């Protein structure tokens, strides 16, 4: 019999793959807030919308996405106060369909902020006057439809979409991306379930909604003779292509494997901004334990098994980047600032590896000189942002 309040209200224990998913969210939000809120040309405001919010806390006491977001926002507000940075408004919105989860969520949030929240309304926290929280017992679909139908311009916003399974209509992603410019989507693409059910007749309509297509047969046909690696490329590739078709300038995905080494979920990140893209590449790079954009809970799998599954070998990112840069810039001269901006658009490697890559190229004798406008050479093996590099 369930005699503990936790057993009645709380979600089950947090699995490892869930932790990784939430680490990505936690790691991304502060640098993102810093960039958008402290941007002197912006509105000093930002918003995070979590439309599959859950109950806030897992049965083992670990924090769910809403509590992580609130604590992160409070941490950011405190940092900004210490440094006298101006914040106008940080808006956090949580939507949860299940009544029991919603009530638990509301309670968890109230205990974190130490204040009562208003039902379905925006509450301004007394203790943190720049923090506004809305929590609603509603659905992802209704909330986003209302938002995109009624709001013309929005402040910089991250949409965190974390459904169970594959009930995630593409139409709403399309609406968000085609209507707003300052938006980023972090989608939990539940690969394991999607892969298992993609060709099952009874869910073709739902799958079509997920991918934003009327007829799934052009995808399922391609899958007929595909290997498991090819399936992954086709399924994720189609989804990302469709996002790009409706306005996503950059997409990135991070694979999270389950305890048996199976691909469990892929976090798909969507943005129109190269700085946002670069920041997320950095987070993925930090969280990854394979050096590819991938997380495998190595503690649970025998090393040999990992090799057998053919997972990526460790790759040296600065080496790979040095080859990429040299291929682009061979025989040319470029200011390092501009080179960094180019690397920001590299599909997977973050721009923080640029200088290490330049050092490698220097050692390999592929750089003729590094100098400033005045033709003064800079100190050996240094690469200041405002200097120019002449490649051989
Ligand atoms: C994977 S859980 C979310 C976990 C949460 N994001 C976290 O990290 O702690 C999905 C949640 O979405 C809720 N849900 C399912 N369908 C929904 C919908 N259409 N709109 C809003 N919430 C929904 C479920 O009740 C469940 O609590």
Image: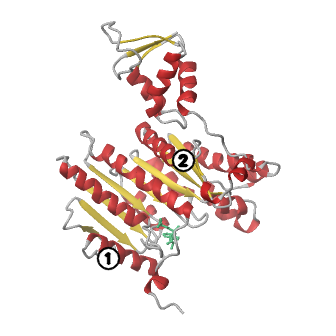
Coordinates of residue 159 in the picture (x, y in percent) = 44, 56
Q: Secondary structure at mark 2?
A: loop
Mark 1 to mark 2 CA distance (whole Å): 39 Å
- Residue corresponding to mark 2: 288
The residue carrying mark 1 is 119
Q: Is residue 340 left or right of residue 313?
A: left
Q: Nearer the viewer, mark 1 or mark 2?
A: 2
Q: Earlier in the sequence, mark 1 or mark 2?
A: 1
Q: Residues within 10 Å of mark 1 (few under 14, many from 20)?
A: few
In this image, 70 relative to 191: left or right? left
> Residue at the spot x=26%, y=44% of the render?
38
For residue 138, side relative to residue 293 (left or right): left
The quadrant holding residue 64 is bottom left
Look at 31% across and 70% down and name the residue there.
Answer: 112
Q: Secondary structure at mark 1?
A: loop
Q: Residue at x 52, y 55 (%)?
A: 187
The x and y percentages for residue 320 are: 58, 29
């Amino acid at each position: 019999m369930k005699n503990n309040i936790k057993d009645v209200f709380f979600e089950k224990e947090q699995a490892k793959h869930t932790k990784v998913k939430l680490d990505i969210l936690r790691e991304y939000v502060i640098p993102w807030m810093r960039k958008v809120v402290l941007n002197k040309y912006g509105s000093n405001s930002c918003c995070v919308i979590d439309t599959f919010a859950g109950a806030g806390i897992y049965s083992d006491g670990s924090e769910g996405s809403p509590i992580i977001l609130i604590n992160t926002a409070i941490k950011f507000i405190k940092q900004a106060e210490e440094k006298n940075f101006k914040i106008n408004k940080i808006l956090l919105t949580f939507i949860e369909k299940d009544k029991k989860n919603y009530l638990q969520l509301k309670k968890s949030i109230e205990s974190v902020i130490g204040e009562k929240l208003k039902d379905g309304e925006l509450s301004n926290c007394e203790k943190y006057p720049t923090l506004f929280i809305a929590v609603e017992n509603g659905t992802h679909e209704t909330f986003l439809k209302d938002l995109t139908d009624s709001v013309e311009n929005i402040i910089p916003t991250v949409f965190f979409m974390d459904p169970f399974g594959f009930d995630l209509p593409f139409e709403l992603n399309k609406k968000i991306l085609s209507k707003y410019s300052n938006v980023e989507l972090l989608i939990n693409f539940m690969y394991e379930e999607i892969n298992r059910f993609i060709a099952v007749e009874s869910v073709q309509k739902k799958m079509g909604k997920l991918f934003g297509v009327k007829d799934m047969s052009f995808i399922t046909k391609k899958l007929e003779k595909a290997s498991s690696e090819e399936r992954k490329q086709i399924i994720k590739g189609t989804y990302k292509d469709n996002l790009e078709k409706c306005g996503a300038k950059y997409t990135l995905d991070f694979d999270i494997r389950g305890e048996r080494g199976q691909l469990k979920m892929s976090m798909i990140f969507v943005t129109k901004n190269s700085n946002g893209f670069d920041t997320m590449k950095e987070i993925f790079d930090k969280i990854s334990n394979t050096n590819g954009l991938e997380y495998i809970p190595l503690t649970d799998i025998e090393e040999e098994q990992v090799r057998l599954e053919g997972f990526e070998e460790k790759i040296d990112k600065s080496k790979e980047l040095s080859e990429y840069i040299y291929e682009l810039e061979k025989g040319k001269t470029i200011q390092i600032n501009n080179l960094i901006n180019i690397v920001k658009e590299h599909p997977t490697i973050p721009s923080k590896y640029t200088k290490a890559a330049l050092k490698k190229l220097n050692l390999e004798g592929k750089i003729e000189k590094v100098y400033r406008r005045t033709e003064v050479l800079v100190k050996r093996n240094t690469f200041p942002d405002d200097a120019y590099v002449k490649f051989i």
